[in-house]
Amino acid sequence: MSTRHPGLLRRLLTHRQGGAGLLLLLAILLLAAAGPLLWPGDPWEMAAPPMLWPGEDAANPLGSDVMGRDLLTGLVSGARVSLMVGLVSTLIAAVLGTLIGAVGGYHGGRIDAALMRLTELFQTVPTFVLAVVLVAVFRPSVATAVLAIGIVSWPATARLVRAQVLSLRGRDFILAAETYGMGTARLLWTQILPNALPPVIAISSLTIAHAIQTEAALAFLGLGDPNVMSWGTIIGGGREQLVEAWYVCGLSGIALVVTVLAFNLLGEGLNDCLNPHLRSQ
Amino acid sequence: MNRRDLMLAGLGLAALPDLALAQGHAHATAAGTPVRGGTARIVVAEPPILTSAFITTMNIGMVSSKILEGLVSYDLELKPVPALAESWDTAEDGLSVTFNLRRNVRWHDGRPFGSADVRFTLLEVWKKLHPFGRAVFANVTAVETPDDHTVTIRLSAPAPYLFNYINTYGAQILPRHVYEGTDVLQNPANTAPIGTGPFRFKEWVRGSHVALERNADYWQPGKPYLDGVLFRFIPDPVARTVALEAGEIDVTIGSLVPVTSLRRFSDAAKYTINTDDGRFLASIFLAQINVRRPYVSDRRVRQALSHAIDRAALVRLVWQGYGKPATGPIPSSVSQYYARGNPQGFDPKRAEALLDEAGFKRGADGKRFRINLVSGSGDSLESNRAGEFIKQSLARIGVELELIIEDSAAYLRRVYTEADYDIMTSSLHKLPDPTLGVQRLYWTKNIVRGAPWTNGSGYSNPELDRIMEAAAAEGDAAKRRALVTRWQAIVQEDAPILDLVELTWTTVSTARFRKDRPQGDGMFAGLEDAWLALAR
Amino acid sequence: MAGAGTLSAAPAARGGLPPLLRRLLQVVPVLFGIATLNFLILQLAPGDVVDVLAGEAGAATPETMAALRQSFGLDQPVWLQYLRYLGQLASLDLGHSYRLNLPVRALILTRLPPTLLLMVSALLLAIVLGSLAGILAARQVGGWLDTLLSGVTLLSYAVPTFWLGLMAIVLFSARLGWLPSGGMLTIGASHDGLALLQDLAAHLVLPAVTLSTFYLAVYARLVRSAMLELHGADFIRTARAKGAGEWRITLHHAFRNALLPMVTMAGYQAASLLSGAVLVETVFSWPGLGRLAYEAIRTRDLNLLLGILFFSSILVVIVNIAIDGVYRLVDPRVAPRARRA
């Protein structure tokens, strides 16, 4: 959502967003990292009375689910899962997208045309449905979820990198490097990619946010890893008790919203700070 | 649908209920005079077809039973009650059984029902195509029809279990004039059935509902009371529950209200929770162990696993008390064969001792070894949660469990074709007679690679084989019971299968919905005796 | 669920052929690609149709299973199966759902109208309310409405639709009892005419609003920035100089220009809207394609799932072509490829 011709006020606001996102994210990371120390224990342990409401018992401050599992421990575990899935799948998407975009943009011609067709294909297929199919077919697990999300998330990055590479290609320093006989791979690696990277970082923050949402949606549909407690798992499991114990779905959803919000804010901030020139195009 | 049906297939299937809860008002034997009229709105999972004669999928049975009938139905003690058969008689030597059929019964298309229909369905459908019918009627050598209302079955050996599987779910009677000479499995009547039952098929809108209308010519005069039955498909459990509360539907059968929501229907003035409708299925949630694998090939390890699982806690936490800890392969509802107590019950200390004795000591990290537990994706939420429960239980004795949820095809292939698993969970119907529902799980001859719901543990014990085969052909009730008792002791000791929870199937209805006659196979009731009280 | 899409660059333009023909030609490799993808997934999947069938039947012997595999052609070489698969798809035969015992195409077609109804309602809602919010916000930059809008926008990007739907059920159905919690019609109630429409509308409100939230925010921002941009443009100033009222200017000039990016956006969002529908329909038991997909997931009905994937991809392609047409209608001066640049 890059707006053109931003006013000064708007720009400031955007920076404020980036800052807010960063702080929020730091807090979440801290919780995810320190959680196991503060609230040790297995999130699957069925130790509490079932369906305890938040605040009802100090031992389980956020209550328990229908199986008597502590919700706070579950949420902290879910934070680690969500962050991990978001980061790794985005890494996959970023690598795939950068590779495809850079190769296509640099080579042009048929290779570019073929790669753009592929990109178009992945933008035509409803990506969530494709992710669902992949995970359902290859058995739900953290690994399949990460791979599936990575596989459906790269096209935006690829297009962005391609556009960057196209605009860089004609620049003097690239032409100079070519004249010196620098090989394609080396040229891409040392000259083009470093310059094309900033927008990739910005978009990756948004991709992480989306990946976290997708993982939760998969788990909600029953396509989560049965050995791993993620926020989507908690929402999906709490759905049957939606009316009696809505806090189970409610709290894990709020955790999800806050985390996604943090990455979105950060992404916008990064976008503004890392490629101000995009805004003046 | 989902795993639930899948299993069903296997007889398997799942569910839940119980006894432990004080749902004293269990059966809807309501006081009051039946009222004519009204349409009962019932929620079921959408079935793939509407004929049960050759398939065991439960939700098919729940719908088709209103349209098509069997020779008998079952009461709460699982004793046969006349339906299309008015009476029956077994010869002294047990080698022939005669059914006297009801007269003046007509198919919904007006043709008369008679002995030729029974003979045709038995020989051409049940015996050839029905997954269990093949076993039930295996000893049948001939079917004689001396007249239109008499059927005599000749047997090569006594088949006492036969009387336990001739209701509309186990042996549904099809109209010969519609099916003879056709490909039974592809007959169009399978999706628009013509039966003798209290309701006629009216329409099926896929994804939405099946509508049935009153059969005015039904053989019980004055019945059915209802003008029709509307089966609605509401796949989402929350939506079903809300719809029942809102009075948009009258009944949910087959445990479609999640156990965790049942408490919302505990007000007996407004709702009825029936926990007896599934007695006939005698379903047990169990963990089957692949005895061909390392670690679990050792009987002591299997016993340790059995000792590690607190079945009472499992029932309480996962099934919310709707169910009962299982002691052995036969549930308590099949009272004449039920074995009280299990020597391999909950005892974590004993479990640890057994594992130490077997040489699998705890490592530095406190773990002994790692195995997996496979379940199917279509299973109930309870089945998934039970997996989580078992994982926690085994962790306490140092056994690490990896949970694997496979889709139906991959699950069946992994268990029955590739035997690539350590433990699998499933909910299997044990049926009222062990020869029908239990033997298949232990019998050496039933280790059939690639065939689902056979002996998938790979357990083989020649002595047990002999006992099971003797029990099948034993006509004397007392002798048969003695054989089954020995059989249970052996499988408890060897533990190739850990029977965990006797499942209770719940039927939840609004108090308006009444049914006069309690049935052990109430999930497959014809509902000719059901009526809707006037709204107050 | 379309967060990442918001930054994606528009497809690059290449030109030459007449636009419509060019679009249609572009579709062919895309469909071919999807078909190939589908086939790959089918081949790599563990277990096959025969395993499922055997499970359904309750029992099967290895012999009957082998015979079944033969009858489905599963014993043939992979390339032959691939060709057969392409041939089937070319004749729009999406295969058979062995779970529901019906052809996949028939299943999909009967579930399509509810999905279209839901998607179109959500899109209209997003466009109308989003435009309104955007216009109002732009009239007073930094005002309370503008601030509220940016807050809501941020949130709506972050809130997963399925969770929003669940919470809406808790509040509006369970607690307040204002709206039905799911379904499309009160089955069994034989309404007709106005009563039927009312019934449908009551069931439609929650899912449509839930699905539209994200897009509503997108359109609001789009319209807001288009407005701001145009407020300073020459022709607006001219209009203002001629004494046209603020609302008149807004509606006649600025809004008309904002329409173009909105139409473009609608095209890009067809795919994500379909993805969103899967979740929303699941939450609200809306009997459309999305719920069919959920049922297919639960029963692992692979044929059906792949059929839905293929079909919904076609749907996206069709919507995109239609958008091209609409685009020309809205602004005949602009060649379709220009907007894509």
Image (spheres, coloured by chain):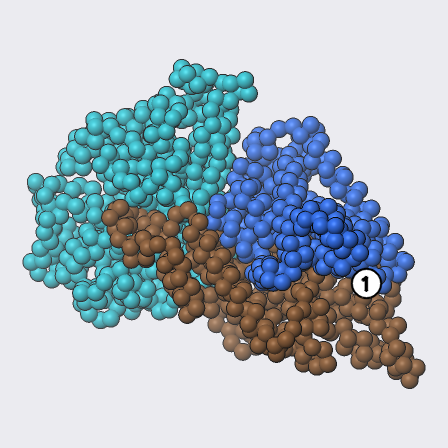
* Chain assigned brown: C
Residue B512 against residue C51 in the figure, above or below: below
In the rendering, what colour is chain B? cyan
Residue C268 position, x and y percent, is 65, 65
Q: Quadrant of the N terminus of chain A?
A: bottom right
* Chain assigned blue: A
Q: Is residue B465 visible?
A: yes
Q: Residue at (28%, 26%) from the top-left corner?
A: B489
- Position of B44 compared to C267: left or right? left
Residue B480 against residue C326 in the figure, above or below: above
Circle 1 is placed at which residue position? A281
Q: Nearer the viewer, residue B458 or B3?
A: B458
- Position of B303 compared to B175: left or right? right
Residue C329 position, x and y percent, is 67, 81
Quadrant hosting residue B328: top left
Q: Nearer the viewer, residue C315 or C24?
A: C24
Mark 1 residue element: loop
- Position of B237 compared to A212: left or right? left
Q: Residue at (51%, 30%) from the top-left corner?
A: B392
Q: Residue at (36%, 66%) from the top-left corner?
A: B212
Q: Nearer the viewer, residue C203 or C230?
A: C230
